Image (tube, coloured by chain):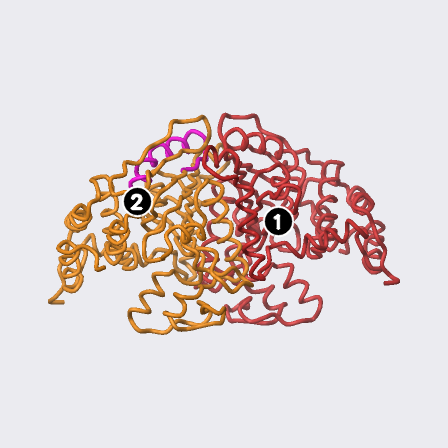
Chain colours: A orange, B red
Amino acid sequence: MGDTTFFTVDELTARVEAILAKAGLNAVQAGAVARVVTAGERDGAKSHGIYRIEGVLRTVAAGKVNPNAVPELMADDGTAIVRVDAQQGFSPPAFALGLPALAERARRLGLAALVINDCTHFSALWPEVEALTGQGLAGLAMCPSYSTVAPAGGNRALLGTNPIAFGWPRGAGDPYVFDFATSVAARGEIELKRRAGERLPEGWAVDVDGQPTIDPEKALGGAMLPFGGHKGSAIGTMIELLAGIMIGDLTSREALDKLGTTTLAPMHGELILAFSPKIFAGNRAGDPFARAESLFDAILGQGARLPSQRRFMARARSKAEGIALVSAEIALLDRLLENGAAT
Amino acid sequence: MGDTTFFTVDELTARVEAILAKAGLNAVQAGAVARVVTAGERDGAKSHGIYRIEGVLRTVAAGKVNPNAVPELMADDGTAIVRVDAQQGFSPPAFALGLPALAERARRLGLAALVINDCTHFSALWPEVEALTGQGLAGLAMCPSYSTVAPAGGNRALLGTNPIAFGWPRGAGDPYVFDFATSVAARGEIELKRRAGERLPEGWAVDVDGQPTIDPEKALGGAMLPFGGHKGSAIGTMIELLAGIMIGDLTSREALDKLGTTTLAPMHGELILAFSPKIFAGNRAGDPFARAESLFDAILGQGARLPSQRRFMARARSKAEGIALVSAEIALLDRLLENGAAT
């Protein structure tokens, strides 16, 4: 297409980083956030790409994140828990700081947890679990979000969209990765449908009175529904308990009460578990990585797909051709660099 | 009702234990299995109550479980992983053996895992996570089963119904507990519908040709579907990876290949994670147990239920009145004691 420009990862990262730096983020914050924004664009995950920059700038402008935060790694206390205090900054630099300690702990103990406290959450969770698979570890990550989902059988927003992500390493190949909201749809998907003027599928949401709705606007003002009925609702509740309450950080309701809006990035914590398949398998027969490949082959062999396959295809295309942005997207980047977020 | 007899937990346990002992199980196997069967009846969880005894006896008669197994706790290797070799016996005595070590490890490290290998799985998973909540710990348990579920987008059985259970302690009250199959329905539910001559709701299963079916018989011969579409399918796959492959034990497909039937209890492994909320919360503000109560209050306050509420109500009734068995059920117990399993 004539109006498409191609960027390398480094070029787009630098461009996004410049926007964030101009908005006042220090180097550690701007760099880490720019890398996850660029990774989203690279993977064709538009709802986690440059579309998110404006929310970051709004959150900074509202004073709801510390743009000068330097995350702090707590000293090893002899447990399986690695703790990072994000110092009210964004989550990506806090995760990047904790990753080496988490990986080391998991290799030593077989199983370890990274607790990130007091972060403004920004990013999908797949960057976290993919960072672990890149080290030969399996990862399970979760966090609360904003109170926008009604529990099964209820009619008012209480739980968050509470994402959960899992990754399993596959050597030099793309890892097995899933990352999804425990609501039927992610809030970003509803927001994109609102912008596109489209209606929602049935079963996604209820309005402010607890009645089913297919109007994105009413859904955003009401409550979304959990995926899989009471089962998804239970998993969403577990995420509030483990990745909010247990780690001494905010629940989705507390996060919303604190900020009073869902248009700013939420502040809370995050929990990431890392497993060493090598340590777990121990002396048992069979190489776990080779056995996992047989399972994936069996899934693909019946015509089913692995999760994230589309994202990895987009990544391969971006690697070969560059990350494609259309002129309107480049104009957005220019505008954000020039003027910051619309107010 | 005139034909109902009431049993205490101890009376029913002894009655079930006598059946299992006569069928050849040693004391450690018979006692632990009888306790979980009785717990199922006590909780009104009929699909995990005395209905399951016949399957146990069939599995013993077929020589597919070691009735004389004495599970073995492996020495502490300095990791966060507690290992129990079930010695080809049933899972409940292996779990009972590993529980104290798992709880101690979780209290010390904040997070620990119990790996049970080479067990014939018998029991729902809620007895496991409730045993942890009874010690003030949160628990997350999972295991493969038999290859009876098609992955989302596929049309042939590959995954198991792969249950996942979670528990959060609530002091002296009933814990927060969920325990569900990652298929739309549990296999036992389809089996009960077959026995009752009922049809299945749509979306539960496909037949042997991969076509949707509402016939329980065809569903049992075909494949069940995962709950929540690709999300439930991804979680079911994660369970194969973590609680099968990673712990060096069988996947659902391997378990079925090994036994060649789903009428016997499956042999594989089990993974149980234990979390100490006290250690995780550390010096952070707020008591995690008190904060969790606020979350539960908010769920109940909008008319939604907590998972397992019905089971706990049945438990309270059993405690007050005794466990109610109708005459046909008592006749079943008599027949099983007299003749063992039907062949």
Percent x, y of residue B26: 75, 37
> Residue B35 in magenta?
no
Label of residue A90 in the image: 2
Q: Which residues are magenta?
A: A91-114
Q: Secondary structure at mark 2?
A: loop
Quarter of the rendering containing residue B202: bottom right
Q: Is residue A47 left or right of residue B172?
A: left
- Image: B53 above or below A96: below
Q: Nearer the viewer, mark 2 or mark 1?
A: 2
In the picture, the quarter occupied by the C terminus of chain A is: bottom left
Q: Secondary structure at mark 1?
A: loop
Percent x, y of residue A185: 41, 62
Contact flag, marks 2 and 1 (Cβ < 8 Å): no
- Image: A107 above or below B335: above
Amino acid type, mark 1: Pro
Percent x, y of residue A47: 30, 59
Amino acid type, mark 2: Phe
Q: Is residue A313 left or right of residue A250?
A: left
Q: Is residue A10 visible?
A: no
- Image: A11 above or below B208: above
Indicate the chain on which mark 1 is placed. Answer: B
In the picture, the quarter occupied by the N terminus of chain A is: bottom left
At label 1, counting other C-alpha atoms closer than 10 Å, the crowd grade (few under 14, some 14-19, many 20 or more) is many
Q: Residue at x 68, y 54 (%)?
A: B311
Predominant secondary structure, magenta span:
helix
Label 2, label 1: how many angstroms apart (C-alpha)? Answer: 46 Å
Q: How many marks?
A: 2
> Residue A96 in magenta?
yes
Residue farthest to the left? Answer: A2
Q: Is residue B265 left or right of residue A267?
A: right
At label 2, counting other C-alpha atoms closer than 10 Å, the crowd grade (few under 14, some 14-19, many 20 or more) is many
Label of residue B266 in the image: 1
